[in-house]
Structures are given as structure tokens and as C-alpha cells.
Image: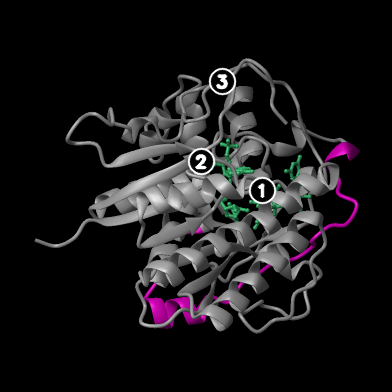
């Protein structure tokens, strides 16, 4: 009988953590997620997968922990004995990282170091290999030094978040080279979905479109509309994380679509999907500007496509449509297109408050 494959995911309650859990469960893994204790439930995105741990069918287990708490990370590693760790936990909002730089750097930078140290000690003591995935970001390219950006493009981070991700990136490489860890950096460009946090620009737009159609919102306040991003579908991107850990040798990979679009392009597609003109609804608010902006991101996915056999399944218009459709479903409007409807079941929480 083959041994159960066990994985730990930090950040399991986030967008990517939820899709990765679904994917690993579909590959017959036992999945252990690290969650933060909060005064209200923060498990909406994973509740549909959760089975009472007393049941013999349980394959998803949750442990309280935090990337700022190294002792607990070590304890969970010792208890769970994983073969793979996916480090997705982070304060991931770039604008917020300017407001809370110390906490951002602690969770993103030091958090990664704490986890790497735990893996190093566990592996050296037991001789058991634990493969490690680090959730790197296209934000590390910041003020871009080449177009498109690939694995060899120099970093120029432009936020506390991006600086911390660069630190985590190099620590991951350093642990690979110093201690022979199977540690990989995914350099993932923006990836979105109906499960995207409501304060990231894509979801803020698609949620506003649905609420405007439903008569629940009149205006959408945004910052810089000229920035360009390489946007893909999150469900596609978590497969690339897993593929990296299935290779013979650890390495670093860019995951992207190879296309770039502005916020205006996204607005145009999202509003026209419901026959509205975005210019009638969008207003400027300077509080959404950042002290330093990342103007243009476009990734070169050639290495991932060639070495991992990875390919995106959803194009830019398809992504916008499935996000708008899921948010329409969340306010009780069906436009006949079921794209994204399975995510409506997961994200059925249309708060009365306008979140921005
Ligand atoms: P997300 O939706 O913001 O989820 C972040 C997760 O990290 C949540 O589960 C959150 O828990 C958890 N977390 C936050 N602080 C933590 C801490 N101190 N200790 C432990 N867990 C903590 O982010 P995502 O979009 O899924 O992204 C996943 C990872 O990829 C992140 O590291 C992000 O920086 C990185 N990344 C994302 C993108 C993208 O476009 N989505 C691109 C490149 C890289 P709560 O639910 O309790 O808040
Ligand atoms: O901003 C502009 C904003 O917050 C995109 C994270 O997952 O991807 C994400 O970071 C652009 C920026 O994502 C608003 O100025 C305009 O130029 O959706 P975002 P991000 O900063 O690209 C990377 C890859 C990550 O790693 C991060 O974790 O949109 N923008 N008006 C706005 N952005 C927001 N949030 N809100 C606005 O009102």
C-alpha cells in the first residue's frame, strides 16, 4: 500500500490556499492547514471541504498557528510529518504594507525564515526530505528592469511587502544551497478569482459591478487606473506550485500569462459585461494611491511552460467574466452564464458594507 502524501499549507484560508487544498485533496493528499485564531470565523473559503476530524473520511485538518510564532510552526511540523510545505501565508496587500511595514515584513520575511529553519532542523534530525514552496511575487520586479520579466530579471522592489518577498526569495535559495533543501520559489504574477479578497482591485471592481446592477452601490472609488498587470486565474496558478515540487530538482519559476492589461481595460470589460459604461460610475480617491507604484508587469512564462508543462486555461476576458458572474450570483442575479457559479457557493457572503 502506498504511503499517504501529507502536505502543510500556511495561508490555507486565503484565495490560493483554498484552491491548492482542493487540488491536493483531488490528488489524494492529506492536507494540514495553519490558521490564525480570530474572533470571527475566517474559514469561509475552505468550509466546503471540511469534514469533522473524528470522521474516517477526514482528509483536511486545521491547526492554530502564525508565521510570527516559530515555536508553533516547529510543533506542527513535528506532529504532522509532511512531505511538502506550501508557504502561502502573508500580509499580502501591497497598499496595506505601507501602513503596517513591520508586521508585513515579520510575517512575509521572517515568517519564511522561521519556517525554513524548522524544515532544516527537522530534515537534519530525521533524514526525511520535506519539499518547500515559497510564494514569491511579481511585485519583486517593482520598477521593472526588463520587459517581459523572467527568472533572470533583476528585482527592484517598491513596497515593504515586495522588499520582504525579495528577502524570503533569497533565503529560500540560500537554504537550498546551504542545507540541500528541496526548496522552490514560484514568482507568481497577479492571479485572481471569485475568491480574491474584496480589497484587491479586480474583485473590488467585479463586486462593485454586481452591487451597482443590484442597486446596492452607486459609485466605485479607485486610485491609479493606468497601472498594468499580468492577470491570470488563481485555480491555474496553484497547479504550478504543485508541479514545482514534483520535479527532480528544486528550481525557481515565473508563472504568468505573458499579457498585460491596465485597470482601465479591466473596468471596460467588467462594466460592458452588464452593458454599463464604467466612466459613469468610477470616481477617483487619492487614498488608494501608493507612495511608490509598480507601473507595468508582464511575465515570461516560457520556463514554466517548457519545464513544468504548465499552461493557463482561462484568458483575460474569460477571467473578468467569470468574476463578474460569480459576484452577480452573490447578489442574487443570474445572467444565464454559470461560469464561476461554483465559487458563488463558496463566497456567498455579500456584506451590506462597501468594502474597499
Ligand atoms: P490572501 O488571500 O491574502 O491570503 C493570505 C493568507 O495568509 C490568509 O490565509 C491569511 O490568513 C494568511 N496569513 C496572513 N498573515 C498571516 C500570519 N501572520 N501567519 C499565518 N498566516 C497568515 O493571499 P493569496 O492571494 O491567497 O496569496 C497567497 C500567497 O501568494 C501570499 O503569500 C501572497 O503574498 C502570494 N502572492 C499572491 C499573488 C496573487 O496575485 N494572489 C501573487 C504573487 C504572490 P487570514 O485568512 O487569517 O487573514
Ligand atoms: O492592485 C491599482 C493599484 O491591490 C493592482 C497582491 O496579490 O498582486 C497583488 O498586488 C493595481 C495597483 O494588486 C485601486 O495601485 C487602483 O497598481 O489589486 P492590487 P497588487 O498591488 O498588484 C501581487 C502579485 C501580489 O503579490 C500581492 O500580494 O491596481 N489600484 N485603484 C488599486 N488597487 C487597489 N487594491 N484598490 C484600489 O482602489
- Residues in magenta, as a range: 286-315
* SS at circle 2: helix
Query: Residue 63: x, y in percent?
Result: 44, 38
The disc, 3 or 2, on the residue closer to the chain's N-terminal end is 3
Q: Nearer the viewer, residue 51 or 287?
A: 51
Label at residue 40? 3
Q: Nearer the viewer, mark 2 or mark 1?
A: 1
Residue 105 falls within the magenta-colored stretch: no
Q: Is mark 1 within 8 Å of ligand 1?
A: yes
Q: Nearer the viewer, residue 276 or 337?
A: 337
- Image quadrant where one finds the C terminus: top right
| Residue in the picture at 35% in, 39% down | 61
* SS at circle 3: loop
Residue 302 falls within the magenta-colored stretch: yes
| Residue in the picture at 45% in, 75% down | 182
Label at residue 92? 1
Q: CA distance from mark 3 to mark 1?
A: 20 Å
**Most common secondary structure along the magenta stretch:** loop
Q: Nearer the viewer, mark 3 or mark 1?
A: 3
Q: CA distance from mark 2 to mark 1?
A: 20 Å
Q: Label 2: which residue? A: 323
- Image quadrant where one finds the N terminus: bottom left
Amino acid at each position: 500500500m502506498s504511503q499517504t502524501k501529507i502536505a502543510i499549507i500556511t495561508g490555507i484560508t486565503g484565495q490560493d490556499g483554498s484552491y491548492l487544498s482542493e487540488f491536493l485533496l483531488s490528488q489524494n493528499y492529506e492536507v494540514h492547514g495553519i490558521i490564525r485564531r480570530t474572533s470571527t470565523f475566517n474559514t469561509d473559503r475552505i468550509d466546503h471541504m471540511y469534514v469533522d476530524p473524528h470522521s474516517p473520511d477526514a482528509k483536511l485538518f486545521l491547526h492554530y498557528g502564525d508565521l510570527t510564532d516559530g515555536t508553533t510552526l516547529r510543533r506542527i511540523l513535528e506532529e504532522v510529518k509532511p512531505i511538502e510545505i506550501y508557504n502561502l501565508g502573508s500580509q499580502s496587500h501591497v497598499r496595506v504594507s505601507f501602513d503596517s511595514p513591520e508586521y508585513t515584513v515579520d510575517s512575509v520575511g521572517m515568517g519564511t525564515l522561521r519556517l525554513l529553519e524548522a524544515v532544516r532542523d527537522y530534515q537534519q534530525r530525521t533524514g526525511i526530505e520535506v519539499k518547500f514552496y515559497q510564494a514569491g511575487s511579481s511585485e519583486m520586479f517593482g520598477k521593472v528592469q526588463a520587459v517581459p520579466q523572467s527568472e533572470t530579471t533583476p528585482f527592484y522592489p517598491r513596497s515593504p511587502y515586495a522588499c520582504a518577498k525579495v528577502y524570503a526569495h533569497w533565503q529560500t535559495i540560500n537554504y537550498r544551497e546551504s542545507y540541500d533543501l528541496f526548496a522552490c520559489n514560484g514568482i507568481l504574477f497577479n492571479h485572481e478569482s471569485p475568491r480574491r479578497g474584496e480589497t484587491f482591485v479586480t474583485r473590488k471592481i467585479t463586486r462593485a459591478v454586481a452591487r451597482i446592477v443590484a442597486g446596492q452601490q452607486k459609485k466605485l472609488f479607485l486610485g491609479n487606473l493606468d497601472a498594468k498587470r499580468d492577470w491570470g486565474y488563481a485555480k491555474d496558478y496553484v497547479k504550478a506550485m504543485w508541479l514545482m515540487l514534483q520535479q527532480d530538482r528544486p528550481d525557481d519559476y515565473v508563472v504568468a500569462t505573458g499579457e498585460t492589461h491596465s485597470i482601465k481595460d479591466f473596468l471596460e470589460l467588467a462594466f460592458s459585461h452588464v452593458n454599463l459604461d464604467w466612466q459613469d460610475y468610477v470616481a477617483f480617491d487619492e487614498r488608494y494611491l501608493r507612495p511608490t507604484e509598480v507601473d507595468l508587469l508582464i511575465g515570461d512564462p516560457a520556463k514554466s511552460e517548457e519545464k513544468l508543462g504548465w499552461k493557463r486555461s482561462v484568458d483575460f476576458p474569460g477571467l473578468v467574466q467569470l468574476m463578474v458572474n460569480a459576484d452577480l450570483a452573490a447578489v442574487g442575479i443570474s445572467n444565464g452564464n454559470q461560469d464561476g457559479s461554483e465559487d458563488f457557493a463558496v463566497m456567498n457572503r455579500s456584506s451590506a458594507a462597501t468594502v474597499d
